[in-house]
Amino acid sequence: MFSVLMLIPALACLGADSFEAASVWEAYKNNFIQGDGRVIDTYHKNFSHSEAQAYGLLLALKFNEKELFGKIARWSRNNLQVRKGDRLLCWSWGKRPVGEWRVKDYNNASDADVLTAWALLLAGRKWNIPEYTDNALALIRDIRTLLFIKYQGRNVLLPGYSGFVQSENNFEYNPSYFIPLAYRDFIKAGDAPEFWKTALKDGLWMQKKSLFGRFALPANWVRVGASGLEPSRSSKYGYDAIRVLLYTVEWLEPEKSQHLNGAVNVEGLKKLFEISQPDRWIPAEVRLQDDFISPDDAPAGFYMIYSRLMEFTGNHQLAKQLKQRALVKINEEKSNYYSCSLFLLALKQAY
């Protein structure tokens, strides 16, 4: 339970989205964040993973909760940052077959490492805590030296340390793991700035090549092979790829750029909306091989991201409609870890 008084700090920082956003945040903390800082994915057997911990850090920053940020950071450091020889985070932590709760998979997830390093960097600057800055720089160095592969002379981020590369020209790529705003802050942090400038440019190049189908949508997963790039695994746009839109808008918004550099095809999305909007729904997935549009409605977090994108491109009426739909749906989804995470991350508020 929470009261209006508990909402005041969040209301102050979130302005127009005030009460709805703050109430979702309070529900998020109650449902998904333990007292020790462990963030729980209730959809996946109450496991924890490095992505959830990173989202928790970013949201604690967004809502200016210094103490909570510290708890989440400590839990991640003590339980996930336990690989030998580097500072990368183990991606999966949960109940093992023998009943013990601990790391389940020591491989990393590169987006979580990038997001964690970025959150620590921002927190060190915001609250003047050198320890956060030092930890961020150590993690940034390991991301740079351990997680990139050369493809056609360009620096490309792998999804993880192991298991994704067959050869230099045969590997898997996840477009939603490229987070340009983080790279921009890595440049400023002083860790090999020329590398991160190049990585930012090369990441945008890969994003443009990762758009497929009639609507030119990003794929959840991409296979890079001798013949180029193609959708892999489920060959769909949806669960993972929605974050491409989020990170692109978050990156461009502070600079008020008038274009999206080709990383997102806005016209393709508008066509998708034209098909779905008469019934006031957005599809959860699109199959990229044949452009089949799923009849399943997207969750609230998707709607909030689409609203941000449409607002950014000047389509304010559609942005308002999508936002209203997001606000209605989120009240039904406060137990949905992923939808709530996306909803809160998509709020128009600096970290």
Image (cartoon, grey):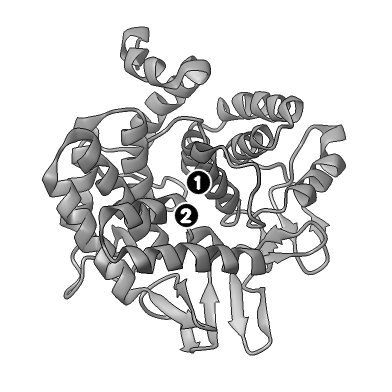
Q: What amino acid type is highlighted by mark number 2?
A: Pro
Q: Name the residue under label 1.
A: 251
Residue at x 47%, y 17% (from the top left corner): 15
The secondary structure type at the circle numbered 2 is helix
The secondary structure type at the circle numbered 1 is helix
Q: Mark 2 points at which residue?
A: 180
Towards the viewer: 255 or 262? 255
Residue at x 44%, y 67% (from the top left corner): 199
Figure quadrant of the C terminus? top left
The reply, left or right, for residue 234 in relation to residue 174 is right
Question: Is 350 drawn above or below residue 261 in the view shown?
Answer: above
Q: Where is residue 240 in the image (x, y as percent from the top left)?
A: 56, 56
Question: Is 343 drawn above or below residue 184 in the view shown?
Answer: above
Contact between labelled residues 1 and 2, with CB atoms less than 8 Å apart: yes
Residue at x 31%, y 14% (from the top left corner): 6
Residue 226 visible in rendering: yes
